[in-house]
Image (tube, rainbow, N blue to C red):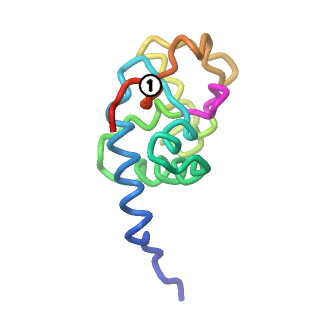
């Protein structure tokens, strides 16, 4: 018999903070898991941000998870979207060019919440 896994309150709160930051990423811009983690004071929490992105895709909330990529601009989270091309299609619809799962001119499109937002 399997038991449903519930997020701890601490993880749930962190996920909600991640979602609030992700909602602020401007259209046509991207950021990384680690950059969000660092902004939230969890410098080594990139993997946890990834879990939050995976979790948000299971719900009804509209969170632009496609705008969060790895530190090199790779679409490492694409397997968690409805199709293997959905993440790329959403980014391309916002004007980004993707070749072999890599955002072209990544630094030009990079958005850093530590520079754009005040805690």
Give the residue at x 46% y 77%: 4
Span of residues in magenta: 69-75
* Residue at the (44%, 31%) spot, across then down: 114
Characterize the magenta stretch by its predominant secondary structure: loop
Q: How many marks?
A: 1
Name the quadrant containing residue 6. Answer: bottom left
In-front residue for pair 73/86: 73
- Of residues 41 and 79, the one nearer the viewer is 41
Height in image: 53 above or below 74? below
Magenta-drawn stretch contains 41: no
Quarter residue 11 falls in: bottom left
Looking at the rendered image, the quarter that the C terminus falls into is: top left
User: In the rendered image, which quarter contains the N terminus?
Assistant: bottom right
Residue 103 in the image: x percent, y percent? 60, 19
- Kindly identify which residue carries mark 1: 90
* Rendered location of residue 79, percent (x, y): 59, 43
Q: Residue furthest right?
A: 100
Q: Residue furthest left?
A: 61
Horizontally, residue 15 falls left or right of residue 88, namely left
Task: Determine crowd level at label 1: few under 14, some 14-19, many 20+ residues with C-alpha closer than 10 A.
Answer: some
Label 1, secondary structure: give it.
Answer: helix
Residue lying at 58% horizontally and 15% vertically, measured from the top left = 107
Query: Magenta stretch: residue 72 in it?
Result: yes
Q: Is residue 33 left or right of residue 63?
A: right
Instruction: Check the image and name the residue furthest to the bottom.
Output: 1
Image vertical order of residue 81 relative to residue 114, above or below:
below
Where is 61 relative to 100, above or below?
below
User: Residue at position x 47%, y 26% from top?
Assistant: 112
User: Residue 27: x percent and y percent?
Assistant: 36, 20
Query: Height in image: 26 above or below 19?
Result: above
């Amino acid at each position: 018999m399997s038991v449903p896994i519930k997020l701890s309150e601490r993880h749930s709160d962190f996920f909600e903070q991640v979602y609030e930051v992700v909602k602020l990423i401007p259209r046509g811009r991207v950021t990384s898991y680690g950059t969000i983690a660092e902004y939230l004071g969890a410098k080594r929490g990139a993997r946890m941000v990834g879990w939050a992105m995976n979790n948000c895709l299971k719900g009804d909330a509209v969170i632009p998870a496609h705008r969060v990529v790895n530190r090199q601009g790779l679409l490492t989270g694409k397997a968690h979207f409805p199709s293997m091309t959905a993440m790329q299609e959403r980014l391309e619809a916002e004007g980004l060019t993707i070749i072999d799962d890599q955002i072209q001119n990544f630094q030009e499109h990079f958005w850093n919440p530590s520079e754009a937002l005040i805690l």
